[in-house]
């Protein structure tokens, strides 16, 4: 989708990723003063910085091995060249998941985005921000409050709907979530709405009854449009670190994810979890949350992300 906030991305990414940059970027800057040579200690220090930022063991080991190979071949002999080498390795890691969410110009029926995740990831808030982002890109949007078990969730989603200027389909507490999704889809179709975002109850991947309920919502949507939901998006909390990988794997097995939104990156110094997710899950990272405001949900841009982490735009070797 077209992102009208593109001009803000660099500033938003840099500020939102400040905590991770202060750990990873600042540590890297100390290692890359002009003219110093690269040795085993240098690579060990880089390895430590990557692991501390939650880049993940697999990704870190592969990056260090490739950097060591460059050094051995004398393709990389000075630390002031490490920035570009590390940047290239990180970007290569993100290449398989660097696919933006594409919505057809004029979908025949609403493009349905089914939002899933565990409790506390910021899913409801993300839906409000996503609705706002779609709206500001010129799309008509509706939301289905299919988390019928938590009154607070419905109230919060309704408030976000008002803030974003989009209608929210709500039914009485305890209603069948699949029935809410069905009604919202019918309403959106009748109005010619382009995008329908469906909230679901937060659940642990170990709660089989709730996972079965999620599958039911997918089946019901599929009866109206065989292609629906067109996007099944997992919302994960960046501050949970490696637990995000387990959540992603379990939800993917249950409902076949097509995208990931990573929230609360502004609240952690371990933003490297993005690389671990890319390495392990290979699922497109669509959006990242960088703050509390309605416009703090950004399309994931790997180059902006890596440069913000490494403080790249200020360095040109």
Image: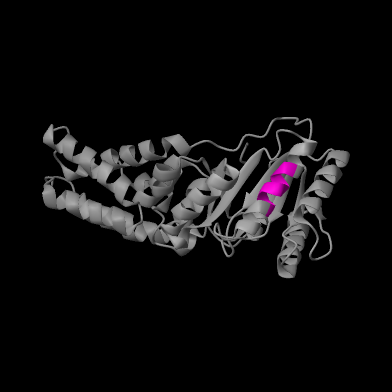
Percent position (x, y) of residue 156?
A: 72, 65
Percent position (x, y) of residue 291?
A: 55, 60
Q: Which residues are magenta?
A: 213-219
Q: Residue at x 72, y 69 (%)?
A: 152
Quadrant of the image for the C terminus? top left
Left or right: 217 in relation to 253: right
Report whether residue 238 is seen: yes
Percent position (x, y) of residue 63?
A: 27, 42
Q: Main secondary structure of the magenta part?
A: helix
Quadrant of the image for the N terminus? top right
Q: Residue at x 33, y 60 (%)?
A: 23
| Quadrant housing residue 148 | bottom right
Give the colour scheme shown: one colour
Q: Residue at x 70, y 50 (%)?
A: 131
Percent position (x, y) of residue 259?
A: 56, 43
In this rendering, is residue 98 above or below 158?
above
């Amino acid at each position: 989708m077209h992102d009208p906030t593109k001009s803000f991305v660099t500033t938003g990414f840099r500020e939102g990723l400040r905590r991770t940059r202060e750990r990873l970027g600042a540590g890297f800057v100390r290692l890359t003063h002009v003219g110093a040579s690269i040795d085993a200690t240098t690579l060990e220090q880089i390895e430590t910085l990557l692991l501390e930022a939650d880049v993940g063991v697999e990704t870190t080991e592969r990056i260090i091995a490739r950097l060591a190979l460059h050094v051995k071949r004398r393709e990389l002999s000075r630390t002031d060249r490490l920035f570009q080498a590390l940047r290239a390795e990180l970007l290569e890691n993100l290449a398989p998941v660097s696919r933006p969410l594409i919505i057809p110009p004029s979908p025949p029926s609403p493009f349905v985005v089914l939002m899933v995740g565990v409790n506390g990831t910021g899913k409801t808030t993300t839906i409000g921000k996503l609705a706002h982002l779609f709206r500001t890109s010129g799309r008509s949007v509706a939301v289905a409050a299919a988390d019928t078990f938590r009154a607070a969730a419905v109230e919060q989603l309704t408030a976000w709907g008002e803030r974003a200027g989009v209608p929210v389909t709500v039914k009485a507490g305890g209603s069948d979530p699949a029935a809410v999704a069905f009604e919202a889809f019918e309403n959106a179709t009748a109005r010619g709405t382009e995008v329908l975002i469906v909230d679901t109850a937060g659940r642990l991947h170990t709660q089989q009854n709730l996972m079965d309920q999620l599958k039911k919502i997918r089946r019901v949507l599929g009866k109206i449009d065989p292609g629906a939901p067109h996007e099944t998006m997992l919302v994960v909390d960046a501050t949970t670190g490696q637990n995000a990988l387990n959540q992603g794997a379990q939800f993917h097995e249950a409902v076949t994810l097509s995208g990931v939104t990573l929230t609360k990156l502004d609240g952690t110094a371990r933003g490297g979890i993005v690389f671990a997710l890319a390495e392990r899950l290979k699922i497109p990272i669509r959006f990242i949350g960088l703050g509390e405001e309605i416009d703090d949900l950004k399309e994931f841009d790997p180059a902006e992300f890596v440069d913000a982490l490494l403080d790249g735009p200020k360095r040109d070797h």
